[in-house]
Structures are given as structure tokens and as C-alpha cells.
Amino acid sequence: MMFHTLVFCCLCCCHLVGVFSESVSVMEGDSVTLNIDDTQIREDDYILWKFGAEKSIIAQIRRDFGVFNTFNGPDERFRDRLKLDKQTGSLTITNITTQHAGDYKLEIHRAKLSSKTFSVSVYARLPVPNITRDCSSSSSSSQQNCSLLCSVVNVGHVTLSWYKGNSLLSSISVSDLSISLSLPLEVEYQDKNSYSCVLNNPISNQTTHLNITQLCQPCAEVQCCDTVEAVMRLVVTALMGVAAAAAAVLLLNDVRSSRG
Ligand SMILES: *[C@@H]1O[C@H](CO)[C@@H](O)[C@H](O)[C@H]1NC(C)=O
Ligand SMILES: *[C@@H]1O[C@H](CO)[C@@H](O)[C@H](O)[C@H]1NC(C)=O
Ligand SMILES: *[C@@H]1O[C@H](CO)[C@@H](O)[C@H](O)[C@H]1NC(C)=O
Ligand SMILES: *[C@@H]1O[C@H](CO)[C@@H](O)[C@H](O)[C@H]1NC(C)=O
Ligand SMILES: *[C@@H]1O[C@H](CO)[C@@H](O)[C@H](O)[C@H]1NC(C)=O
């Protein structure tokens, strides 16, 4: 109760003196510490950490009363995830998920109120891009060229690119969440350059190197099945021919017998 009165008083009497903000990017599953720059916080400072548009209080510190509390948030999303540094008042969020992305507001209530907002972006761990032979491509029927596809599934806020050595050949970007992407590349069988497919978001990347010898085998299955189909057609045509001949013979016999 005492704190609330104190805060209320502070908010009434004083105006906001400092408004700062900082962007923080973190990978899903990692921990992030939101630091209070001012290591000179005083014993009697009342410090609040608030989260989201609703500004739910997730931590409060009042050192001279021995108060160091963390809260789970209205929907429990911070349960077992918050740690407070009793010296600095810094807040650590452990094993972060996309649910914990958003604005964290630090308020230091003294004679005057100062505040700072940390905008936390959480990025998913990236899958390794998968390079496959694309036998359905029309140009894969050409003798010199090999068509390839680099693909990833369930990604968001990423760029997928093909590199030849260090130079960018092509790329595709997506801002949506959870979609699948693929990017084609055509190389010659004898190509000795080194190619790689790179998936990246603002804080990390995953690379797969292309092995032409390994992937650019002739499109065996397609050739196999095409051949079988052709043989089948031939057989069917032949059978139909036989059937037609037989019908003709029967017809001829009919004509002969009716004459007879
Ligand atoms: C991290 O959070 C995820 C999702 O809530 C959970 O499945 C996983 O067990 C947690 N890992 C650790 C090390 O706490
Ligand atoms: C890559 O794609 C091929 C063909 O779709 C599939 O068989 C293989 O399991 C995939 N590999 C990975 C690592 O996803
Ligand atoms: C083969 O690929 C090269 C690029 O690697 C391209 O310039 C050429 O036009 C392709 N040829 C055919 C027949 O698709
Ligand atoms: C991938 O990340 C590494 C550091 O992890 C960086 O050195 C490299 O330049 C990045 N590559 C690309 C293509 O973004
Ligand atoms: C490419 O694949 C071939 C056949 O699988 C293998 O012998 C060769 O070592 C691979 N090259 C590289 C650079 O990994």
C-alpha cells in the first residue's frame, strides 16, 4: 500500500524527465538481459518493469524495503522466466519465445520519474536449407544443365539466397510467418564454381553448400517412368491392332456365312 501511495505521489508531482528506447534482438530459446544503465540506482528508488501495450507490471524493486518481486503476467507467460539482479535492477528473461516479444518499460521512480523502453524482437531458430534436384523443370531435359531448388519450410521474416562464391545470384524475402520458400538455380554439369544457398534473418544465418557431383545425376526416375509408359503405349497399341484384326476376321466370317 505504501508503495502505491508513493508512486501515485510521484506521478502527480513530477513530470517525465527521461524517455529513452532501445531495440533488442534475441533468438528463440536464448536469454536476454535488459540492463539498467544507471548503476547508481539508490536504495529508495522504486523500480518497475512493465510489459506490453497493457503495461502489466512484471517486476518491482524497492531495495530499502527488501522488495524484489517478479510476476507471471496476466496470462502466466512469464512463469519461471524472470530473474532480477538485486544490485542493478536489471531484468533477465530466460528461454525466450515469440510470446515474449514486445515492449518492456522500465520506470525508475525517484523525486522525478525516468523511464526507458526496450523493444524486444524474438527470431525463430533457422532451419538448414535443403537443396534438391528439380527434374520437373523443362530445362532439365537439356544435356548440359542441371536444375536445382533450394527450399525451406515454416519460416518467417527471412531471406533465402543463392551465392556463387561470395557474389549474390538471386534472393527472395518473406515477412509473413510460417510459409515455405524455394528458389531455383540452373548450373552446368561441368561447373566448377562453388555455390551455396543461404537462409538468413536479421540475427543469424544457415548455409548449405551445393555439391554438383552428388546432386546433378541424370533424372533417373523420370527417364525410367517415361520409358515404361512409352512401352506400355506401344503394347496397348499393338493389342488394339490385334483386336481390330480379329474383329475384321469375324466380320468377314459373318459376311461369308450369311452369303452361304
Ligand atoms: C523453453 O520453453 C519451451 C517452450 O515454452 C519449453 O518447451 C522448453 O522446455 C523450455 N526449455 C527450458 C530449458 O526451460
Ligand atoms: C530434402 O528434400 C528431400 C526431397 O524432398 C527430402 O527427401 C529430404 O528429407 C529433405 N532433407 C531435409 C534435411 O529436409
Ligand atoms: C544452361 O545454364 C546456363 C547458366 O548456367 C544458361 O546460361 C543456359 O542458357 C542454360 N542452357 C539451357 C539449354 O537451358
Ligand atoms: C552468416 O553469419 C556469419 C556469422 O554468424 C557471418 O560471418 C556471415 O557473413 C553470414 N553470412 C551471410 C551470407 O549473411
Ligand atoms: C560431393 O559428393 C561426392 C559424391 O557424393 C563426394 O565424393 C564428394 O566428396 C563431395 N564433395 C564435397 C566437396 O563435399
Image: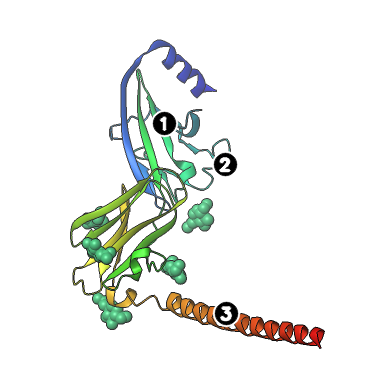
| Secondary element at tag 2 | loop
Q: Nearer the viewer, mark 1 or mark 3?
A: 3
- Whole-angstrom CA distance, mark 3 to mark 2, is 71 Å
| Secondary element at tag 3 | helix
- What residue appears at the point 29 percent right and 73 percent down from the top-left corner? 143
Q: Residue furthest front?
A: 259
- Whole-angstrom CA distance, mark 1 to mark 3, is 96 Å
Q: Which residue lies under the disc numbered 1? A: 64
Q: Position of residue 229 (x, y in %)?
A: 52, 77
Compared to 2, does 59 lie above or below?
below
Q: Position of residue 54 (x, y in %)?
A: 51, 28
| Secondary element at tag 1 | helix
Q: Nearer the viewer, residue 70 or 153?
A: 153
Residue 134, image quadrant: bottom left
Compared to 249, does 85 lie above or below?
above
Q: Position of residue 114 (x, y in %)?
A: 34, 23
- Whole-angstrom CA distance, mark 1 to mark 2, is 28 Å
Q: Amino acid at mark 3?
A: Thr
Residue 63, image quadrant: top left
Q: Amino acid at mark 1?
A: Asp
Compared to 214, does 46 lie above or below?
above
- Dot 1 or dot 3: first in sequence order is 1
Which mark identifies residue 237?
Answer: 3
Q: Position of residue 48 (x, y in %)?
A: 43, 30
Q: Which residue lies under the disc numbered 2? A: 76
Figure quadrant of the C terminus: bottom right
Q: Nearer the viewer, mark 1 or mark 2?
A: 2
- Dot 3 or dot 2: first in sequence order is 2
